[in-house]
Image (cartoon, rainbow, N blue to C red):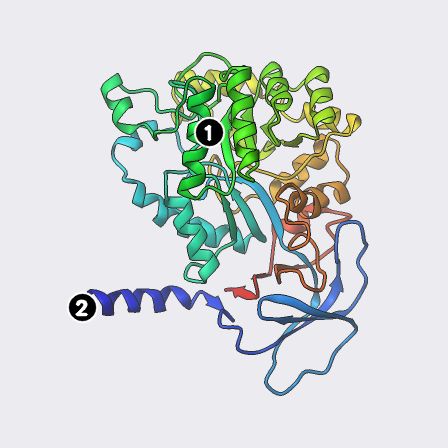
Amino acid sequence: MKRVLGLAVAAFISVAISGSAFAQDQIINVGNLITDAASGPSGPATIIVRDGKIAEINRGATSASADAQVIDLSSKTVMAGLIDLHVHLTGDPGGDFWRETTEPAEWGVVVGAKNALVTAKAGFTTVREAGSSQYSAFSLRRGTADGVIPGPRIIAAGPALAIVGGHGDVSGFTEDVNDLLTSGYACTGAIQCAEKVRKASRAGADIIKITATGGVLSQQGRGLEAQFTNEEMQSIATTAHSLGLKVMAHAHGARGIEAASRAGIDTIEHGTFADEAALKVMKANGTAMVPTLMAFKGVSEGLGKGIYTPVVEEKIRMTLNTVGKAVASAKRLGVPIVFGTDAGVFEHGRNAEELQLMVDAGLTPREAVASATTLAAKALDMENEIGRIAVGYSADLIAFAGNPLDDVTVLEKIDWVMVRGRIID
């Protein structure tokens, strides 16, 4: 009976995904093609998708064989799917930190399946899961890769490395409860931190996430500066790189950002209080900034509503006058700026609103679109697979009305999505 039920559930889930078996070529007639952010719209074209990859790109219409699936997007603009380098699919927004004592980790997979579909329908065909329970994001990663769950390609970190009692570790409860709930990835000292990196790699992490500084939404109010020591961060970066893994660091305070970049961390998430000195170190080390401006917009919408504890509200208010200022400085100094939102702190599906916030902060529309496509793909070392429309690339495509290189807000309404050759209904 259990086997029959399992097969029935799998069949039910799969109806949300079309074309997953790749039984036929897919001929996509495009009204206006944008191959990448560096190129303008080039007019009508035909994209032929075969076995989940782009097989041909032809200008104008192309005759289809009798057994091909024809997809008419002749009234739409089509470009590569968007990439969000900072999401939390397994969580929804809210300030009830005590839920950690009442909700099992398995619930995160249920929530994550919902949010994976919402995220894909919003036009995001690849995401970097920036922190979850031990196996929930890994389960989602497999589900979307195998076509069991409709959603984006997922690059998953699993639990973040944190200092004991710092942002990313469990806090806010009595010590006996904190100890029961801890993820097992808090570390002290260079040797133990290296061990935790190896543990994360063994568990299946695609990338290592650390909380290099204090955070806004954690229940400890000890500021937003560096929490790991220089030696600990250097150990994490060196160990991760030796295993072929990059490191992403949650970091708000300027000196924490500077220390993380100098240690060899690959991307700085948030970068809220980055000053000239910190940004110069980022530039010298090739460290990219992931601004997550939507996170601050999202949490600010909850102020004064009883959603957050007084400690958290105070930290939120501390950041609001500074949000976005580091983006213009980073651009001026030549620091790479790549797209990430921190979705989960705000409602999933609103990810594309980040683009206009980036423009408001000083990027051009073309630069903002590049940050969510070609530059984000490069940050993932996947620039030969995703981020543009080219022969041999994954068939990650989105369709919409308008030209985002003039007005990025057109990407807030996506009409059609394909991930790895599968149409998301």
Give the Cα distance between marks 2 and 1: 46 Å
**Secondary element type, mark 2:** loop
- Quarter location, residue 31: bottom right
Q: Residue at x 31, y 64 (%)?
A: 9
- Quarter location, residue 136: top left
**Secondary element type, mark 1:** loop
Q: Residue at x 62, y 50 (%)?
A: 82
384 in relation to 221, above or below: below
Q: Residue at x 81, y 53 (%)?
A: 39
Question: In this view of the protein, which residue sits in the foreground, 89 or 416?
Answer: 89
44 in relation to 258, above or below: below
Q: Which mark identifies residue 302?
A: 1
Residue 60: image location, x then y, percent: 79, 73
User: Extreme top residue here?
Assistant: 222
Question: In this view of the protein, which residue sits in the foreground, 268 or 360?
Answer: 268
Q: Is residue 294 left or right of residue 20?
A: right
Count of number-bearing discs = 2
Q: Which mark identifies residue 140?
A: none
Q: Nearer the viewer, mark 2 or mark 1?
A: 2
Residue 257: image location, x then y, percent: 61, 20
**Tag 2–tag 1 contact (CB < 8 Å):** no
Q: Which residue is mark 2?
A: 1
Residue 11: image location, x then y, percent: 35, 69
Q: Residue at x 42, y 45 (%)?
A: 137
Residue 380: image location, x then y, percent: 61, 44
For the question of whether residue 174 can be seen, the reply is: no
Residue type, numbered disc 1 = Gly
Nearest to N terminus: mark 2 or mark 1: 2
**Where, quadrant-wise, is the N terminus in this rendering?**
bottom left
Q: Is residue 377 left or right of residue 223?
A: right
